[in-house]
Image: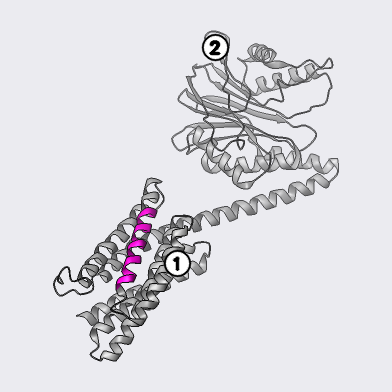
Amino acid sequence: MELYQQIFFATLALAFAMLHGILFFYNSNLRSNLYFAIFLFLYALNIFFDFQESLTTNREAALILIRIHRAVMPLNSIFALLFLYSVFNSKITKQFWLISAGLIITGILAVHKPVDNFIYIQFFMIAVSIEAIRIFVSAVSERKEGAVLIVTGFSLLFLFSMYDMLLDLDLMRPINDINNGYPFGFFFLIIFISIHLAKNFARINKKIIEQEIKTREMEINEHLLKAEDARKSKELEEARQIQLSMLPECIPDIQGLDICFDMRTASEVGGDYYDYQISDDGELTLALGDATGHGIRAGLMVSIIKSLFITHASTMKITDFFQEVTWTIKQMKLNNLYMSLMLVKLKNGDLNVSSAGMPPLYIYRRETKLIEEIVIKGMPLGAFDSFSYQTVETQLKPGDTLLLMSDGFPELFNNENEILDNERVKNIFARHAEKPANEIVNRLFEAGDEWRNGRSLKDDITFIVCSMKARE
């Protein structure tokens, strides 16, 4: 019976050691796979020599086998701790080095006198258990990925190992003639940890692939934008036209809405961004943003935001999307490059809006002929790791019209250095708010041209106008 147990447990450990070794080979960033593979290999040796010692009838051979077992056992515990530090991204502590030194010294002593000095190894095995428990408590309290699975696996190993320790200390007798309980604990440990590591490998590998795709896109965009920056004004104009062609145009009829987008850039490639998406359940998401600066850097930021908008905007709440954008900008270390952004979600007249450093949202109420101003204060995305963005909810009725704009319009200067300001913008909007969306946009641009009277644009100007069509 013991021979079959030896073959089963040793072979199982070696098989999983090879599996996790291969996983580490394909993704060397996951050192937890390496430590677990070494841990399993040492465990297989542990099993083999432990069972061989109990099966042999030659006293000298048994002594050699038990000495090898004593030499391997401390290393097994050391790599168990290394695995725990790695899998939970914990810092290796000073006590680890003390425990490791103790295990190696007592292992050497146990090789010299396998029976008499074995108890010293067990003292440090208790220290290993205490350190493991500390790591487990920290991981569970911080709700780290896979903590419950790993803690469950090691808890079962601990219970079966306690059974063996009680047998070694003659404090109990074997149950059903099982003299080595720890292999059963290791069996459960292997299964639980392998499930976690496999899931973790798949999740991280997917993220790596997605990040590589995004990085390639960024590298291509940055290369193109740098090349465009070195070209003559004609080439910059071509780049501007390409950028405009990728942005959505007016939508004449969608879900009882009349929507129009338009943008005028300053002399360089624009830093404004606008977009829309319609989810499967019919919810419309509108976006209008303004990257800091102009040119290549601003264009790069627009590309990043467009990529995130395509992949996440329709499936996330507005505030969650803002946090995702900020996290991405921070990870890319774009150095003082931020994105002001307003997001509007509209479905069946229910409007939800939030803003990260954008001008007010204006709503023309057809019923009262008045302009409602919604001011939402918020920092630009990428400025702070965590900022509590506020959302406003309201209801649109037939005939009501939304106006979203970038700050390039209200900050226009005339020849006397007077600013257009928000109050004048509201009056211009009110005069034309019952016209079709594209005509409202045209009238706003005309008013801006009249105000600056030939003065060159210093910033991009972008409008989104969305009207709830009045019932026939």
Q: CA–CA distance between discs 1 and 2?
A: 68 Å
Where 335 sits versus 90, above or below?
A: above
Q: Could you tell me what secondary structure mostly forms the magenta stretch? A: helix
> Closest to the observer: 68 or 274?
68
Where 380 sits versus 49, above or below?
A: above
Instruction: Read off the residue under disc 2.
Output: 366
Q: Is residue 17 visible?
A: no
What's drawn in magenta, residue-wise? 119-135
Badge 2: how crowded within 10 Å, few (<14), some, or many (20+)?
Answer: some
Residue at left offset 34%, top offset 76%: 46
**Residue 416 in the image, given as x and y percentages of width and height:** 84, 14
Q: Quadrant of residue 5?
A: bottom left
Label 1 with label 2: CB-CB less than 8 Å = no
**Residue 204 in the image, given as x and y percentages of width and height:** 49, 56
Residue 124 lies in the magenta stretch: yes
Q: Is residue 263 visible?
A: yes
* Amino acid type, label 1: Tyr
Q: Quadrant of residue 337?
A: top right
Residue at left offset 34%, top offset 70%: 121
Give the left or right position of residue 335, taking residue 162 as reference.
right
Assign a secondary structure to mark 1: helix
Give the left or right position of residue 90, taking residue 303 as reference.
left
Mark toward the start of the polypeptide (1 vs 2): 1
* Amino acid type, label 2: Arg
Instruction: Read off the residue under disc 1.
Output: 35
Assign a secondary structure to mark 2: loop
Q: Which mark is residue 350?
A: none
Residue at left offset 79%, top offset 46%: 228
Residue 412 lies in the magenta stretch: no
Query: Which quarter of the rendering shows the N terminus?
Result: bottom left
Give the number of the mark in front: 1 or 2. 1
